[in-house]
Image: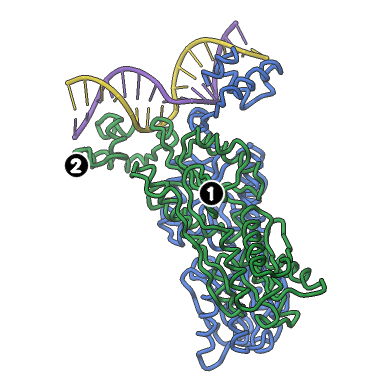
Chain colours: A green, B blue, C purple, D yellow
Amino acid sequence: MADVAREAGVSAITVSRALNAPDKLAPATLRAVREAIGRLGYVPDLTAGSLASNRSRIVGVIVPTIANSIFAETVGGLAAALASRHYQLLLGQTGYRVDEEAALVAAFLGRRVDGLVLTGVTHARGVRGRLRQAGVPVVETWDLPARPIDMAVGFSNLDAGRAAARYLVARGRRRLAFVGGSDDRSAKRLAGLEDGAREACLPDVKVRAILTASSPAEGAAAFADLCAGDRRPDAVFCSNDTLAAGILFECARRRVAVPRDVAVMGFADLPIASAIEPRLTSIQVHAAEMGARAAAMLLGRLDGTPPADRVADLGFEIVERAST
Amino acid sequence: MADVAREAGVSAITVSRALNAPDKLAPATLRAVREAIGRLGYVPDLTAGSLASNRSRIVGVIVPTIANSIFAETVGGLAAALASRHYQLLLGQTGYRVDEEAALVAAFLGRRVDGLVLTGVTHARGVRGRLRQAGVPVVETWDLPARPIDMAVGFSNLDAGRAAARYLVARGRRRLAFVGGSDDRSAKRLAGLEDGAREACLPDVKVRAILTASSPAEGAAAFADLCAGDRRPDAVFCSNDTLAAGILFECARRRVAVPRDVAVMGFADLPIASAIEPRLTSIQVHAAEMGARAAAMLLGRLDGTPPADRVADLGFEIVERAST
DNA sequence: CTGAAAGCGCTAACAT
DNA sequence: ATGTTAGCGCTTTCAG
């Protein structure tokens, strides 16, 4: 920066202003500085800038795994929204382990991120406190917290599960099954489903939980398991469209007619849901928009805009298709 | 850090060493410092550390879009490998625009990333030069560069396309079609396919290029298009399993028998390929491993290990399944 | 509209 | 094994 200043015949601070507040400079000065920057191929060091200004222009996002499409959609929406404002995205994967999340939060705070986006509302001991103390804007996603750390954008997983049960019951299904992850959010969807089944005085929901649910192969295997018992379920609710797709494939192989013999319902309404044959009934939860809204919330806070709602419930919608 | 030093009755540099080189301290000193850190809840500022040490422990990765599973797999592999060594990942999306890539490269260099992972081998003017001048370790992925910027890990997209053609021709297919993106790597796969068709003196390959190919719906629409003409192709090669899945769905709806009437071949061997019905023949390209290898190459360089191969050809394998 | 001085929080290089 | 000094490259604050 000193070199550029010398080349342009100004002081360092003027170069800094040319970069960060160009309209505070006289047009001629600005032009001179820009030319000097071009001649020297100067690349400003944002690390030094962050240290001096105490703003990093980095947002951290922590997801269970980026290889799962539902989170990839959210991260994509987040990254796109941040890029337009020249913020960068630091990505962390927990592998569904809360202690990994705690470690990532610590590491990201050490990087002095300007904001943090978390998946879910259940966190390791001490994480809430550390986050609050750090005073970093935080958005929890993919659920609605009873007591948010700071801000949140999501939907009620419990209500979604219950809505699925009611929907299936209303269509005459009696033997409900669940295939999904054992993580916190999937567990809530299952709880909602069981709740709905109880309302209708149905027998217990058959459960086939998968450690880290995401592949169609796991869905297919889970369905095979469910069929092994005495009475095959007549409806399966999955915590993820990818799993549901696997079940549809397995049904095709077993010549199980969908929806006649068994209704299959997915979750998240990924692109595959509206393309697969038979087209998959799913619950749309606006995965990409969640990321975009999280970005908007963070940026609003960082701009000092009067905080609107701290918690945004994006809701969910059952998208009815051929599989039910 | 000064506070911690005072609390522990040592100097600042000793605190620094407790964090970065604990085995250079006497056990008692180390314990004292750690206790002080715990009592004060001290979180070291990595920004300041980066500035002072000139190492950021951040690696940047730039992909067309994270919402496309093939890149999500690579990023996942990369992130996992880096996390084990306490490096963080900065993520950028180009939306398949080369000028966006150039902007992201500039921004990441400004962040003083310790390494950079790029998708593909074709870049905007000036990017190569800027990267070389910065002296940052770079890994290009998903292709093999004729003249690498620095390092690379990938496979030959041209050969993969040609292998697909030969495979299909050997099974008696004569009217080949291609459905895929119009990006550089897809274009190479298409060129390979056309090359293979020429070898066998087949008629021209029918091409249905999609701007940014990734969803099953796009695959289905593309297949509908291909069928609209006079002679339906008897084999379709897709630049992505997600597109191929869409074609299989569309075939099911049109009662087009696969593989009897048309053979369908995918690319990348994503989880869906081995789960869908009929199971999809695909070309395995080790997407996740590409990320892991890219990480290994960068870390090796950063450790100063004698550079083994600068370019790793992971190759590809045709995984034959029911769809052909 | 532009500049001078000070310092962000840490680590490299050299002591001892 | 531990400490001292200097400085990383920028922005803040206060002046003019």
Give above or below for B14 relative to B180: above
Give left or right: position of B169 versus C14: right
Q: In this view, does B61 lie above or below A241?
A: above
Residue D12 percent location from the top left of the image: 33, 28
Protein chain holding label 2: A
Relative to D6, residue B273 above or below:
below
Q: Which chain carries label 1?
A: A
Q: Residue at x 51, y 60 (%)?
A: A287
* Residue A121 visible: yes
On the rendered structure, is A81 left or right of B269?
left
Find residue A30 and report its horizontal and vertical position in percent. Answer: 23, 40
Q: Nearer the viewer, residue A244 or A104?
A: A244
Marker count (numbered) = 2
Q: Of the numbered discs in the image, which one, if any, rests on residue A145? A: 1
Which amino acid type is shown beneath numbered disc 1?
Pro
Please give the residue where the numbered disc 2 appears in the rendered image: A27
Q: Of helix, strand and loop, which one carries label 1?
A: loop
Spatial CA distance of label 2 from label 1 is 50 Å
Q: Which amino acid does label 2 sit on?
A: Pro
Mark earlier in primary sequence (2, 1): 2
